[in-house]
Image (tube, rainbow, N blue to C red):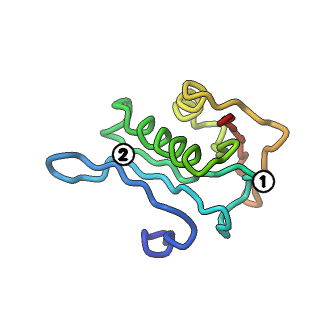
C-alpha cells in the first residue's frame, strides 16, 4: 500500500486540502531526479505521477492546481521539461494536460506488464 511515508523517498507528495475542514481534495507525487519510481524523465526532465482528485472535487480546479505546482517546481529546479503518463480512458486528465501545455509523445509510450496502456505527455519548460 502506498502511504506518504513510503512515497517520501521517491518524491514530494503534493496535497490539496479543503481550507475549512482540511479534507484531502487531491494529491500527486513529484519525483526526485534519482527516484526509483522514475520511468520517463530523461536528462534535464522531471516527472510526476499518481495525480488523483476526489470525486467531489473534480471540475473545481484541484487537478490544475496540483499540475501547476509540479510545473512550477520543475521550472524552479531548472528542468528542461516535465513528463507524465496516463491511461487512454483518462479523458479529463488528458484535456487538463493539453490545456496546461503538455503534448502527446507517443514515441515514448511505455508498455505495462499488466496490460495497461501508458500514454506519455511532455511539457517543454524552455
Above or below 91: residue 110: below
Answer with left or right where residue 90 lies relative to residue 56.
right
**Image position, residue 121 (x, y; %):** 69, 38
Q: Say which of 31 and 109 sits in front.
A: 31
**Image position, residue 54 (x, y; %):** 36, 45
Query: Residue 58 — which label?
Result: none
Give the position of the C terminus as an image quadrant: top right
Q: Say which of 20 and 117 sits in front.
A: 20
Q: Say which of 105 and 74 sits in front.
A: 74
Answer with left or right where residue 25 lies relative to residue 94.
left
Instruction: Write down the quadrant of residue 63 in the picture.
Output: top left
Q: Residue at x 23, y 46 (%)?
A: 18
What residue does disc 2 label?
Answer: 54
Q: Farthest top residue?
A: 99
Q: Residues within 10 Å of mark 2 (few under 14, many from 20)?
A: few
Tell how many labels: 2
What residue does disc 1 label?
Answer: 43
Of marks 2 and 1, the one in the foreground: 1
- Regarding mark 2 in the picture, which secondary structure is present there? loop
Answer with left or right where residue 120 lies relative to residue 10.
right
**Dot 2 or dot 1, earlier in sequence:** 1
Q: Residue at x 50, y 48 (%)?
A: 51
Answer with left or right where residue 57 lies relative to residue 70.
left
Amino acid at each position: 500500500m502506498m502511504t506518504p511515508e513510503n512515497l517520501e523517498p521517491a518524491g514530494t507528495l503534493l496535497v490539496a486540502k479543503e481550507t475549512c475542514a482540511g479534507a484531502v481534495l487531491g494529491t500527486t507525487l513529484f519525483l526526485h531526479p534519482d527516484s526509483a519510481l522514475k520511468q520517463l524523465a530523461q536528462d534535464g526532465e522531471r516527472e510526476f505521477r499518481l495525480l488523483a482528485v476526489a470525486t467531489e472535487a473534480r471540475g473545481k480546479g484541484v487537478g490544475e492546481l496540483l499540475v501547476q505546482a509540479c510545473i512550477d517546481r520543475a521550472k524552479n529546479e531548472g528542468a528542461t521539461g516535465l513528463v507524465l503518463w496516463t491511461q487512454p480512458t483518462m479523458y479529463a486528465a488528458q484535456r487538463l494536460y493539453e490545456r496546461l501545455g503538455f503534448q502527446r509523445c507517443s514515441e515514448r509510450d511505455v508498455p505495462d506488464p499488466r496490460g495497461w496502456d501508458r500514454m506519455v505527455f511532455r511539457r517543454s519548460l524552455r
